Amino acid sequence: MTGGSKTGRIHSDTVVPAGSPWSAVVPSVHVLRIVDLEGRQGVDFLCYSAADPSERYHAPNTLKKSGTLRLTTGHALYSDRARPLFTIVADSCGHHDTIAGCCSAPSNAMLYGVEGVPGCRENFLTAPAEHDLGWKDLVPNVNFFCAVPVYEAGRLAERTFLDGPSKPGDHVDLRAEMDVLAVVSNCPQINNPAAGGRPTPIRVQVFGPA
């Protein structure tokens, strides 16, 4: 786990409100930085080849190559064609979930008995729509700043997510290994601890090469 990476000038700098989506194409060798401004805020994340979005983040390839469920500095996010999309070049938190996927209105009803409460899947459907992507293009995602422990015999925590492990200002830096469409859902979840029960803003920055 490291705190910072070498970056060039800022190309974009956006504060994403609590519960909102963000998306953009990050050019090759540029760095995408996601900052948890107030701490304990889960950030759901998907990415696609900008040239051909049918090539997208693939959790099994990522886990097989990294050899761990917990990604951090030096690990890459691989596509379903076994090519790296992003490499994590800095990480001040060290807790990023790769297995639990995103919340949604249907899963909130299934798990917590609440109806009509949208989640990150609905955000993912909103943001990729700007890039002609839809339901069929959504795959299991990375959850930055989220803790989903796996116990003996593969048992998960009773509520899956534990209290958010990130501190105010924690960030993760991702270097694009090609032109990548990055899609963020700043998690609106209030039924489990993924967003500390109180969703807060995040900052998303794109830096040029150092």
Image: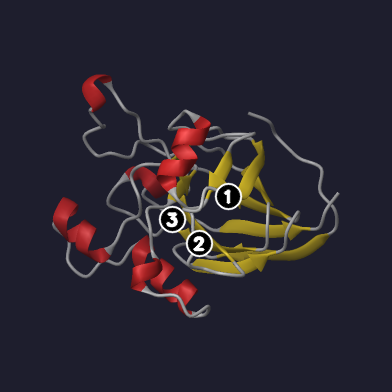
3D distance between C-alphas at marks 2 and 3: 31 Å
Q: Amino acid at mark 3?
A: Pro
Q: Give the structural element (helix, strand or loop) at label 3.
A: loop
Q: Secondary structure at mark 2?
A: loop
- Label for residue 23? none
Instruction: Say the numbered circle drawn on residue 55.
Output: 2
For label 2, the crowd category at 10 Å Cα-Cα, with few meaning under 14, some 14 to 19 and many 20 or more, is: some
Task: Give the residue furthest to the front.
Answer: 81
Position of residue 164 relative to residue 103, above or below, is above
- Residue at (48%, 80%) from the top-left corner? 132
Direction from residue 15 to residue 61 in the image, left or right: left
Q: What is the image's colouring?
A: secondary structure
Query: In the rendering, which numbered label is found on residue 199?
Result: 3
Q: Which mark is residue 83?
A: 1
Q: Quadrant location of residue 24? A: bottom right
Determine whether the residue tagged by mark 1 lies in a helix, strand or loop.
loop
Q: Amino acid at mark 1?
A: Arg
